Image: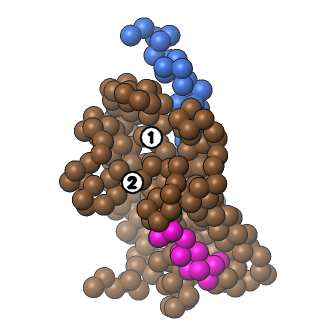
Chain colours: A brown, B blue
Amino acid sequence: MINLSYFANPARFERLAKTLMPVLATVATILLPLGLVDALLISPPDYQQGDAVRIMYIHVPSAWLSMATYAACGVAAIIAIVWKHTLAELFLRAALPFGAAATAMCLVTGMLWGKPMWGTWWVWDARLTSVLVLFFIYIATIALLDAFDRPEQGGQAAAWLTVIGLVNLPIIKYSVEWWNTLHQPSSLSSMKRMLNPAMAADMIRPLMLMTIGLTCLAAIIVTLRMKIEIMKRKRK
Amino acid sequence: MDFHTYIQMGGYALHVWGSYALVLLVMGGFTIHAVVKHERLKNSTGAKQ
């Protein structure tokens, strides 16, 4: 089992970041231009949606980033509550604003895709509404971070709200199965779907390139923001 | 396919290019902000020491 407290030391985190950053930067620098060219030029238009399907190559990674960032924040929040590790609280400060931005990207790109395909920018169906709720949870948690005189108190309050908000993640994931929604069901997320995908290989390739590339860029952003938070805390 | 036809994206130009521009703006903005602030803090901390 990984000893999480091993990484809770800022000096060890700095060393780990120093090793990981060049790897992440290299992968992102290679995959993102390849993914963009594939998404915008090489991949074919959909037989029903036409070129509007190209929005999928950034909408799906945005949705993945919004949920993955929240799940990571959930783990950090539990560590912050149980072990009171400062690094976990600093992770929340670094990752929550980025997660909120990713959720906003997911919502807006979804609306831009929804208008030509569904004929409307927005419907109050379970998937769209639960993602909007995730956005509001992000905003509320960010607001809590600086709502107290002592930053540690704000960190603890935000951690509690993050843990409570974790209940929304399975609701988002299974909303398209539990309720009758306008949003389509997942095409790739389960192993069964992975083995028998409901998408052409020419479309899966740019989707994967963009998802991995944007995930690496997101990891770089959050790591840099965490280093900033550590430096700010050291100055106080 | 000529350039004009490609840019029109089958009539979905505003939706497709708008989405990509938004993602570029958000991800680019966060990256530049993080890099610039990190460098500035690193340099000022170094100058202090």
- Considering the image in quadrants, where does the C terminus of chain A appear? bottom right
Packing grade of label 1 (10 A; few <14, some 14-19, many >=20) is some
Question: Depth check: A218 or B31 in front?
Answer: A218
Query: SS at mark 1?
Result: helix
Q: What residue type is labelled 2?
A: Ser
Q: Answer above or below: position of A82 versus A166.
A: below
x and y percentages locating residue A58 in the rendered image? 47, 42
Packing grade of label 2 (10 A; few <14, some 14-19, many >=20) is some
Q: Residue at x 39, y 40 (%)?
A: A32
Principal SS element in the magenta part? helix
Q: Looking at the image, can residue A131 be seen?
A: no
Q: Looking at the image, can residue A127 be seen?
A: yes
Q: Which residue lies furthest to the left in this view?
A: A195
Q: Badge 2 sits on which subunit?
A: A
Q: Answer above or below: position of A201 versus A19.
A: above
Query: In terms of image quadrants, where is residue A9?
Result: bottom left
